[in-house]
């Protein structure tokens, strides 16, 4: 068989091997207004002994009408903005939405965006999302959303399937340089890296929420704002630098460490940090209020923001080597405002807890 196969390559009758892209360009003039779906199929392949040896691929390019042709960029359930859906059924096929070369005023706002792949990546750049949000899922591929924005329907907040939903099993999710208004954001993975950077989530009526959840893998947040951060990991670690939470910051892991540095909390915000075996390291640039700590490891309270010379020196010892700081305070005792400030609670069953507080005077 090997000899016959080798001979067929040198045979003059052997078909020419070539990459044969199948490209279909659909412009605003050729795309009917009533179009509901496009199925892209490749040309006939070249097979030898049942194997495709043509290095063949399919490439579908869809060009949407401009914002002006669609009646503008307003985001509402009654808008004429297009809804787009892409399913990459081939194992390694991916989807790319790139509006970076389109002037902002001409970019169409996508009323609803649904994308699904198996192993292929999903890359979205400079997109405008609309009232019905985004749902992107992949098994092994990575999901990247950058320099994009969304305005969702405020009446759908909290409903199943609403907002921005990004999920992968063993790939990664990376959100960078985005803004979401009236859209809760959810990113989840099994054995995955989740990253939320240089982005903002805000709802007009409050409660703009970022939910990050992973079974195994690192969860990372950088230079971002949300009214609520809700972060859950099992065996992975959680790291954050320079984030601001308007209402709440909740982080929980089972065995991973937690490192939250350069954190800013608004007045009357809630911070909850929990882990079973991981170490906890927290640094707040702006926090004023009451602090409680439960730990089976060492406890250290550092920084000029803590009220009193030894803020965590009074400990209550419980069975099992658990130590409790029932109530320390930061940046509030001298003004008598501690009961009206923020609340921080930290729990680590076996790990150490280190909290650093910068001095800060809250606005009156």
Image (cartoon, rainbow, N blue to C red):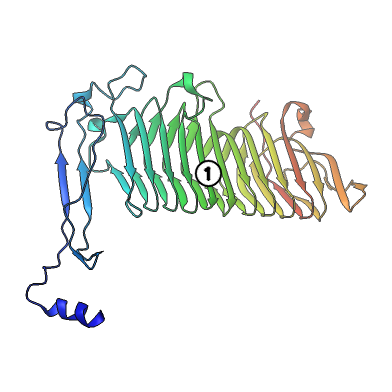
Mark 1, Cα crowd under 10 Å, few <14 / some 14-19 / many 20+, is: many
Q: Is residue 66 above or below residue 284?
A: above
User: Which element carries disc 1, helix, strand or loop?
Assistant: strand
Q: Nearer the viewer, residue 77 or 292?
A: 77
**Extreme residue in the bottom direction:** 3
Q: Can residue 264 be seen?
A: yes
Q: Which percent across, then down, holds residue 80? A: 27, 21
Quarter location, residue 363: top right
**Extreme residue in the top direction:** 78
Q: Nearer the viewer, residue 275 or 326?
A: 275
Q: Which percent across, then down, holds residue 195? A: 50, 49
Q: Which percent across, then down, holds residue 120? A: 36, 52
Q: Is residue 10 above or below residue 312?
A: below
Left or right: 259, with 132 as reference point: right
Q: Can residue 126 be seen?
A: no
Residue under the image location 37 percent in, 19 percent down: 77
Quarter location, residue 18: bottom left
Q: Which residue is mark 1?
A: 188
Q: Is residue 132 above or below residue 196?
A: above
Q: Is residue 329 above or below residue 258?
A: above
**Extreme residue in the left direction:** 12
Residue under the image location 92 percent in, 47 percent down: 318
Left or right: 23, with 271 as reference point: left
How many labels sit on residues? 1
Q: Which percent across, then down, holds residue 210? A: 54, 36
Q: Quadrant of the C terminus?
A: top right
Q: Quadrant of the N terminus?
A: bottom left
Q: Nearer the viewer, residue 40 or 161?
A: 40
Left or right: 217, with 104 as reference point: right
């Amino acid at each position: 068989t090997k000899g016959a196969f080798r001979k067929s390559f040198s045979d003059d009758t052997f078909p020419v091997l070539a990459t044969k892209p199948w490209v279909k360009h659909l412009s605003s003039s050729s795309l009917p207004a009533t179009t509901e779906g496009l199925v892209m199929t490749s040309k006939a392949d070249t097979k030898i002994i049942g194997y495709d040896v043509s290095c063949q691929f399919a490439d579908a390019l869809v060009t949407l009408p401009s914002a002006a042709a669609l009646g503008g960029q307003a985001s509402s359930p009654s808008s004429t903005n297009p809804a787009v859906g892409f399913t990459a059924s081939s194992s390694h096929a991916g989807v790319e939405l790139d509006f970076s070369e389109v002037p902002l005023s001409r970019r169409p706002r996508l009323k609803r965006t649904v994308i699904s792949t198996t192993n292929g990546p999903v890359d979205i750049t400079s997109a405008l999302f609309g009232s019905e949000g985004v749902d992107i899922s992949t098994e092994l591929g990575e999901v990247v959303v950058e320099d994009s924005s969304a305005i969702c329907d405020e009446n759908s907040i909290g409903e199943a399937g609403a907002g921005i939903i990004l999920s992968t099993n063993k790939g990664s999710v990376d959100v960078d340089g985005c803004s979401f208004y009236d859209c809760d954001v959810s990113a989840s993975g099994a054995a995955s890296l989740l990253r939320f950077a240089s982005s903002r989530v805000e709802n007009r009526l409050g409660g703009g929420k970022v939910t990050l959840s992973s079974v195994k893998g690192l969860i990372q947040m950088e230079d971002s704002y949300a009214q609520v951060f809700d972060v859950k990991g099992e065996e992975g670690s959680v790291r954050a630098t320079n984030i601001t939470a308007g209402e709440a910051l909740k982080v929980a892991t089972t065995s991973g460490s937690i490192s939250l540095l350069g954190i800013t909390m608004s007045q009357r915000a809630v911070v909850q940090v929990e882990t079973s075996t991981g170490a906890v390291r927290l640094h707040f640039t702006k926090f004023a209020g009451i602090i409680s700590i439960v730990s089976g490891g060492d406890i250290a309270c550092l920084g000029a923001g803590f009220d009193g010379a030894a803020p965590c020196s009074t400990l209550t010892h419980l069975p099992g080597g658990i130590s409790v700081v029932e109530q320390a305070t930061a940046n509030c005792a001298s003004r008598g405002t501690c009961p009206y400030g923020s609340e921080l609670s930290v729990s680590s069953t076996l790990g150490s807890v280190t909290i650093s507080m910068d001095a800060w005077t809250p606005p009156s």
